Image (cartoon, helix red, strand yellow):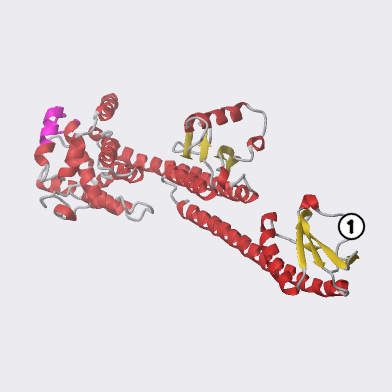
Amino acid sequence: MNGPVTFEGLPEERVRPLLEKLASRCDELGVGLVYLGPDETEDGPTGEVSVTEGSRASVRLVLSHRDDSLGSIVLTSMNEADAAARLQAVVPTIEAVVRDHLMISELEDDVIDLADQITDAYEMLELMYALGNSMASLDDPDRFLSFTCKRVRETLGFGYVAVHLPESADVGPLLAGKTHWDGSAREGTDAEHLDRLLSVMAHSEMSLDAFNGPQAVVRPLRNDQGVVGVMIAGDKHREAGNVSSYDTKLIDAIGGLLSTFLTNSRLYNEQREMAMGVLESLSAAIDAKDPYTRGHAQRVAHLSYQIAIALGYDAAHAERLRVAGLLHDVGKIGVAEAVLQKSGKLTRDEYEQIKKHPEIGHRILKDLKGLDDILPAVLHHHERLDGGGYPHGLKGDRIPMNARIVAAADTFDAMSSTRSYRARLPREEVLAEIRRSSGSQLDPDVVDALLELDFSDFDSMIEKHSKRTAAA
């Protein structure tokens, strides 16, 4: 042999299969085999055949795994004149058995390592793909951040994953001051565990790196304004091992993705506030034409949102109903002020002018990007379930649901507020009339949801708008 037989990639517990294979081969060759453990390895040369008294020839081969000794094997040939020569001839065969076993074992290890790497790569790609697809949900950032915490925890085997954005963070009102959490910690309740960590971090002069450890990773989150929060992955499951470089790289990548999301979310919020400012201005323009309807659009927007929530719609959908309520009467900009402010009964021609406002509003808004889902409510909020409404006389289910919601909110507010031609009606009369309209004018499900609402905020809005009208 040219050197010691090595066992690269083989752990000590896998020496036995090799020894069993060598023992079988040695029996065929008529050679004795003795295994010596690491603590009982004999001193002396290895790989060289030596002859002792009684024509006993032997050779010792060292077994090692990288720099760790796994012991050695001793081959012997007894009571033969040519024992040394015979043993020397056998050694290459034994070497071949060892090397074949090594090669097969190393290939098996390589396959296992490759499979693990492929699995890790797939999990990383699948996670990043899922998060990337969900990043478009800028109108529901809470859902995206909660989804991110859940997927990271499940993929990397942490006990919990949290994203914390303090009140002072420049991330918009939908996110500031919130902590998104998934999982559970073994030390105390989830909230207590996270609160302790956040408290220590807030009052510590150490960097976030000081809080990283074998079972935890802490990373800052940034947007285009700077550091705005922190991502914490902690309580790494023991069966999943300690935090690895793979974990930290993936969390760094996700931290970068979250930082991009937070930047986009802030910009989206700014654009949304700007757009809502424009819509508020349109609503104010209607108020300027008819002071008796001051605040009507805001109140219809408020009721439409509340009805949508009561019907089980999510916050994003309900917000679109709020916008629809705000814009439902924008077409009155195209109606003469004399008609809008007339205190007596309208003539047929004047009523026909009023009936044009849904189509005028539709024409005003139809070319504005991002309002496609708002247009049906603007165009059809004066349709009736029995087909007696305008502008198209739609009946039953042909009336878009959003329009039915705005119609109920519009009807309720119209009776609840003072107009140029009459005073506001008592609440009991308004509710009674709403009930009578259910099934003929208004959708019964929408009416049921409306009647269950708490009207305290609505009444406060009525009072505020009435004072502004009186002052004007």
Can residue 121 be seen from the camera position used here?
Answer: yes
| Labels in figure, total | 1
Give the residue at x 55% y 39%: 235
- Name the residue that disc number 1 marks: 44
Question: Where's residue 7, x and y in %?
Answer: 74, 61
Tell me where the magenta segment starts and ends, as one range. Answer: 417-433
Q: Quadrant of the C terminus?
A: top left
Amino acid tagged 1: Gly
Question: Where's residue 10, x and y in %?
Answer: 70, 59
Q: Locate residue 57 relative to residue 338 in the image: left or right.
A: right
Q: Nearer the viewer, residue 11 or 342?
A: 11
Q: Nearer the viewer, residue 444 or 470?
A: 444
| Residue 364 versus residue 115 in the image, above or below | above
Q: Quadrant of the N terminus?
A: bottom right
Which element type, helix, strand or loop, lies under badge 1?
loop
Give the residue at x 27% y 35%: 299
Q: Nearer the viewer, residue 376 or 263?
A: 263
Question: Where's residue 29, x and y in %?
Answer: 75, 74
Q: Locate residue 259 relative to residue 358 in the image: left or right.
A: right
